[in-house]
Amino acid sequence: MSSHNLDVYMPVLILMAFAAIMVLGALLVGKLVRPQNPTELKNAPYECGEAPIGSAWSNFNVRFYVVALVFIIFDVEGALMFPVATVFKKFVEIGEGGAILGTFLIFVSVLVLGIVYCWKKGDLDWVKSYQVDTDYNEEKDK
Amino acid sequence: MNETVVSYLSQAPGYALLVEKLSEFFGFDAEGFVTFLIFALVCFVVVNVMSAIGGLGTYAERKISADLQMRQGPNRVGPFGILQFLADGVKMLGKEDILPAQADRFLFLIAPLMCMVGVFASLAVVPFSSGLTLTNLNIGVFYLIGVSSLVGVGIFLGGYAANSKWSMLGGMRGASQIISYEVPVTLSILAIVLMTGSLSFNVITDAQGGLPHQWYIFHNPFTFIAFFVLFIGALAETNRAPFDLPEAESELVSGYHTEFSGMRFAFFALAEYVEVFVVCGVVAALFLGGYKVPFDLGNGELIAKTFPAIHPMLAKQIGNVLQLKAFILKTLALYYVVIWIRWTLPRLRVDSLMVLCWKYLTPIALFNLVGCAVWLWAFEGKSMWAMIFKSGVAAAGGHH
Amino acid sequence: MFLKIMFILAATMTLGGAFLTAYTKNLMHACVYLLVSLFGVAGLYATLGADFLAATQLVVYAGGVVILMLFAIMLTGGIQNFVNKFGLDKVPSMGNGKTYTIAGLSMIITAFIIMKVLAPIFKTNVQGELPAFASTVEEIGVLLVTDHVLAFEISSILLLGALVGAAVISRPRRGK
């Protein structure tokens, strides 16, 4: 009986297998029909006709990292809110909705607090304006 | 709970007989085997149909863009050029597979694979009709958010693997854009989960009705806004214009798939078009009533009652075909809008993209979520129209 | 039958991914293998009937943490610079075949000894029926708003702290 329940995950595995078969199969079949004559120039990365300088794997701006960090925080919030959202309706039906709504609102408002803080401090701007501010202040000091 | 396409088909009269016969033939309990066989068959059909729809998506894209720009579009291969995607596929298969010298060979293969696996795995929970849902997981919506995030990893790795500056920029932008817009999308979906009290797509769809006033988009003002937030977020998550910064052709050559050629590129494109279909289907299921047909024609009871001669199972099948049509119709309508938007709006700048996500969509989505919760609590989940109707009746009654 | 296949698949993914993560010298490849391992863990949760936990594993780890790690690698300049600014190796040496063989054998022996010692404790733990597939989401939800409501609220404050921290470290220093 227990094994029967897990059948719901079977299509997931089958679909993943199909996707893998499609990609690998098409690449293998293509190997039979496609030409294969690489040259040094052909295998160079495309840089609009210029000779590429250095590798593309270089340091990137910290803001990408911060976006990912903020996303994870929201992700975890979402993961915590999903079960509560699922049972909210049932609590409303038995007349206990107010308490759950309060709990939920406190949770969300703490989250909103974080957004408001970041907004006020200018952390939600993609291009930070600090540099401009300091330059402006320095000029004013002179 | 947890119905699958197999549990639907097992209601058919021949199913038990088939299992029995096969059990006798093999000498063991064949139920698991039959389950696997049906799943594999249906998955095969779904994968092929979806690939065809993805291919036709590229055709539709070109034809509609041609229409909007007063051009002809593809019109040579097949009637109205409809077989263009097959010709493209054959051409891609015969293209040389260029592997840049500095590239990471392993990731160069893994990146398109990951995009395809992520998109195809998300097909498992798309509710095509009440019978033809591959698997109606209890956690359907959440599962979909989880597996579709694989596409983001795939795009990033695609940009990284080629070791080209354009690809790298496109990959970084793509990944950061996808994860950013996942926040408002998740919050909008959460609002619907709140209204329904379930994460399963079929339960969410069944909570709505066939006619527009029974859809969640018109349920209350907050869900109306949530629909647009979700749709905009979905556009950004699938890298469609005006959010196609990862492959911005005027600044990044072709973005994360600049160095991919032949079939590897084809899989990125296919994954993108299938993902657009999946996302449109999800939006249709959550907000536009999904597979619901007006007047409950979909469950086949009315058909069976009107024509007592036909077998109830057959009536159910007819209902299912109607449901399938309703779902595909709604999804394709949204698909058209997606393409229409692409050829109408100019591309956003990367800073305004992030500002739109974090300063507009996320606060609006949070506001909607709270609004839906308060609405559900205050009016016990009644829709706007039900209340207007009720107050109208009360007012009319008051005068007499 | 399918339970066994799924368990073996998930366990292989978990162990294989974890081993390759430790084995490979390429940081990006290590991240991909880690993703495989995390998927395997999600599969293990699913075989145990914890469907919501499995999905959470996918959403948070596969979607968020792996991307964060990839970005962190790009922040430090990809795999190109093997030596940091102090002249130390960023990627420490991983050993060779001999060390892996010895480590593997000693791990197996240790594991057997520990299992032998712990066997009486686990004896009662026969493989029973899995709980019927009632949705675990609702159970978790009910527990979160009744018994564990304080933990639920405190977790939001923890996340607020993390959000503020992330914002603070991203700010460019206003050095003179």
Image (cartoon, coloured by chain):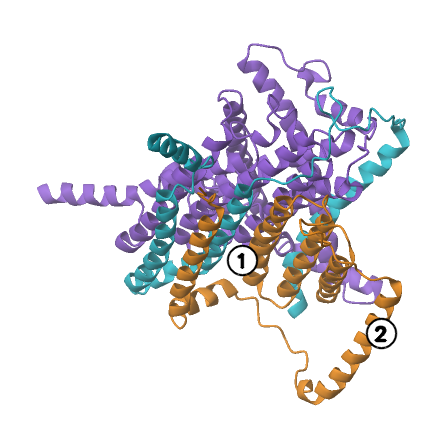
Chain colours: A cyan, B purple, C orange
Q: Quadrant of residue B2?
A: bottom right
Q: Residue furthest bottom?
A: C120
Counting from the top left corner in percent of width and height, residue C46 is at 62, 63
Provide the secondary structure element on which disc 2 rests: helix
Please, is residue C103 above or below residue B138 in the view? below
- Contact between marks 2 and 1 (CB within 8 A): the answer is no
Numbered tag placed on residue C105 in the rendering? 2
Crowding at dot 2, Cα within 10 Å, few <14 / some 14-19 / many 20+, comes out as few
Which of the 4 quarters of the picture holds residue B152?
top right
Report the label total.
Answer: 2
> Is C46 situated above or below B159?
below
Q: Residue furthest front?
A: A142
Q: Nearer the viewer, residue B2 or B189?
A: B189
Which class describes the residues within 10 Å of circle 1: few (<14), some (14-19), or many (20+)?
many
Instruction: Let me know if residue B207 appears in the view.
Output: no
The residue tagged 1 is B138
Task: Name the chain under label 1.
Answer: B
Extreme residue toward the left, this view: B400
Question: Residue B346 at x, y = what percent?
Answer: 50, 22
Kind of residue sitting beneath label 1: Asn
What residue do we see at 67% from left, 54% from top?
A: C35
| Chain at numbered mark 2 | C
Residue A124 shown left or right of residue C123 in the figure: left
Q: Is residue C132 left or right of residue B386?
A: right
- Residue drawn 90% across the image and 26% down it: A37
Q: Which residue type does callout 2 highlight?
A: Leu
How far is the residue under mark 2 from the one under mark 1?
Answer: 43 Å
Q: Could you say where residue A25 lies in the image, as x and y percent from the top left?
A: 82, 40
Residue at horizontal 80%, vertical 67%? B28
